[in-house]
Image (cartoon, rainbow, N blue to C red):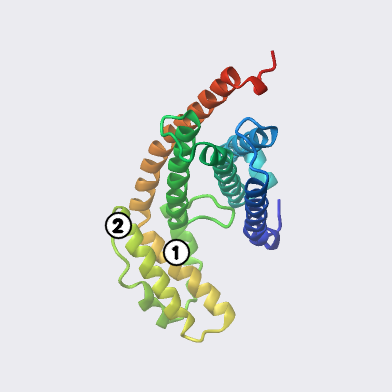
Amino acid sequence: MYPPRVTRFLPFLYFGLLVAEGIALTATYAVLRPSSSSLFNVTVGTVGLASMVIMLVYSIARRSRALRAMARLSTWLHLHIFLGLQGILLVFFHCVPMLYREGHAALLNPGVLNLLAVMVVFASGVFGRYLYAQVPKTLGGQHLAIRELDEELSALASVPKEVHTLWATAPARGGVFAIVGSDLQRRSALRKLGAMGLEPEAHALAARRVTLEWQKAVLGGAQGVFRLWILLHRPLAIAMYFLSAVHIALALMFTPSLRFW
C-alpha cells in the first residue's frame, strides 16, 4: 500500500503527465498534421480507448479486498480519474484530423458520435466525483455508515467549544441543491475556522469535526443521489463502449491501411 505522503502527491504527478501529453500532442498535430488513418493517429486513439478500459479497474477495486490491500481505494480512484482524463484527451486529438481534413466534424460520423459519448460520460464522471467528495469516508476511502460516522464524531470530543457554532446551521437531508449548498457552507465554515488562530493539532481536529458534521447533515440525501447517479452513469458508459466498438469495426472495414487480411 502506498504511504499517505506518496498518495498525496499522485494528483500532481497525474496532472503533470496530462499537461506534458497535451503539449506534445498539440505540437505534433499542428506540425505533422497526421491523417485519420495514419499509424500515429490510430495509436493515439487506441491508447485513449485502452485508458478508458483500464480505468474500470476502480470498479473492481471497490469490491476486491486484494486490490484494496495493494493500494487505498482513494488511490484507485485517483488512477481512475487520471485514465479518464487521459482517455478523453487522446480521443479528442484522435478526432482532430477530421477537422483539418474536412473543415468541420460531421455529426453522424461514428468517430464524432464516439467523441460526444466520451464527453457525456466524462461530464457525468466529474459530477460523480463531486458527489463522492460529499459522502464521508474512512481514511482508506470506504464510505461511512451512520453508526461508523457517529463513532468517528464521538472520538473527536475534544474540539474547542467555540468551533461548535460552525455546524449549528447544518441543513437537513435533501437533494442535489441541498448537497451543493451544504458544501458551500462547509467551505465557508472551514475558512472561519482558519481565522480562529487555533494550534495546528487543534485546527486539524476541528476541521475534521466540521467536515464530518456537515457531511452527516446531508448523508442520507448524498447517498441517495449517489446511488441514482450510478444507475445513470453505468448505461452511459456502456453506450460509450458500444460506440467505441462500432467505430473500431467500421474503421477496420472501410480503411484499407487498417486491414490485416
Q: Which residue is mark 1?
A: 212
Q: Amino acid at mark 1?
A: Leu
Disc on the earlier residue, 2 or 1: 2
The number of discs equals: 2
Q: Is residue 152 visible?
A: yes
Identity, as a three-letter code, of the amino acid under mark 2: Phe
Q: Secondary structure at mark 2?
A: helix
Up the image or down, 19 lies above or below 69; here it is below
The numbered disc on residue 177 is: 2
Q: Residue at x 63, y 40 (%)?
A: 65
Residue 1 picture location, percent across and down: 71, 51
Percent from the top left, x then y, of residue 223? 38, 48
Question: Is residue 96 depicted above or below 169 in this figure?
Answer: above
**From this viewpoint, which residue is outermost toward the top?**
261
Residue 103's disc is none
Can residue 173 be seen here? The reply is no
